[in-house]
Image (tube, helix red, strand yellow):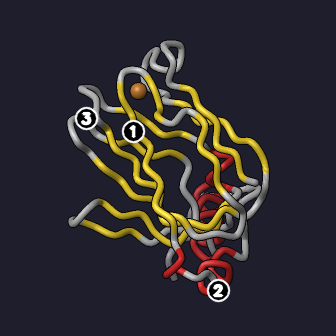
């Protein structure tokens, strides 16, 4: 019979096993019935809205959306630098269908925290249904971009 490992090693192994066997938890505050909301949405009635990212702005700076309506939010970087679209509170308040890199990739997700759109015509499309009404902050977290104006609002009505 093999010797038992020392107690700390045994605990570490047990903790790893427990972590492996626990299904991933939703992010705190995240919409948990997103899959059902996405399945029930009328995607033929989806509205496409475009947000342009540049030095140093989001255009429009106030994005108005309606709760319960499916959207494709096209994030287009029309600038010369990479930019983030970081809106964790908003991203938690929506039901996610997918992310799409135009004509290149499609990613199914349950939750997103931030999205980086690369310089010179990078584009990322967010397919989602806003669920919770409210006013949410969006910022670019790169260097001093926020101080220079990369701060906006997403309003869900
Ligand atoms: Cu930026």
Rendered view: 55 above or below 137? above
| Residue 123 falls left or right of residue 157 | left
Task: Identify the mark nearer the N-term, 2 or 3.
Answer: 2
Q: SS for tag 1? A: strand
- Residue 119's label in the rendered image is 3
Q: Which of 77 and 7 is in front in this view?
A: 77
The picture quadrant where one finds residue 77 is: top left
Rendered view: 15 above or below 141? below
Q: Nearer the viewer, residue 16 or 131?
A: 131
In this rendering, the count of numbered labels is 3
Q: Which of 112 and 100 is in front in this view?
A: 100
Dot 1: within a 10 Å radius of its alpha carbon, few (fewer than 14), some, or many (20 or more) residues?
some
C-beta proximity under 8 Å, tags 1 and 2:
no
Quadrant into which the C terminus falls:
bottom right
Q: Where is residue 138 in the image (x, y as percent from the top left)?
A: 59, 36
The picture quadrant where one finds residue 154 is: top right
Residues under labels 1 and 2: Cα distance?
29 Å
Tell me what residue is drawn at x 56 percent, y 64 percent: 5
Is ligand 1 closer than 8 angstroms to the Cβ of mark 3? no
Residues under labels 2 and 3: Cα distance?
35 Å
Q: Position of residue 96 (x, y in %)?
A: 56, 68
Task: Identify the mark nearer the N-term, 1 or 2.
Answer: 2
Nearer the camera: disc 3 or disc 1: 1
Dot 3: within a 10 Å radius of its alpha carbon, few (fewer than 14), some, or many (20 or more) residues?
some
Name the residue tied to disc 1. 52
Q: Position of residue 88 (x, y in %)?
A: 63, 45
Task: Identify the mark nearer the N-term, 3 or 1.
Answer: 1
Nearer the camera: disc 2 or disc 3: 2
Name the residue tied to disc 2. 40
The picture quadrant where one finds residue 19 is: bottom right
Tell me what residue is drawn at x 55 percent, y 32 percent: 61
């Amino acid at each position: 019979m093999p010797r038992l490992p020392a107690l700390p090693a045994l605990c570490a192994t047990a903790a790893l096993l427990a972590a492996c066997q626990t299904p991933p938890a939703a992010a705190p505050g995240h919409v948990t019935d997103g899959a059902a909301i996405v399945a029930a949405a009328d995607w033929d009635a989806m509205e496409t809205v475009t947000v342009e990212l540049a030095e140093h702005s989001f255009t429009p700076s106030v994005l108005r959306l309606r709760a319960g309506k499916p959207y494709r939010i096209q994030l287009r970087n029309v600038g010369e630098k990479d930019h983030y679209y970081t809106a964790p509170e908003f991203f938690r308040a929506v039901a996610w269908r997918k992310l799409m890199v135009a004509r290149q990739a499609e990613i199914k997700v349950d939750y997103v925290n931030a999205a980086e759109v690369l310089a010179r015509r990078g584009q990322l499309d967010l397919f989602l249904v806003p669920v919770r009404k409210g006013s949410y902050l969006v910022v670019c977290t790169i260097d001093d971009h926020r101080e220079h104006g990369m701060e906006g609002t997403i309003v869900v009505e």
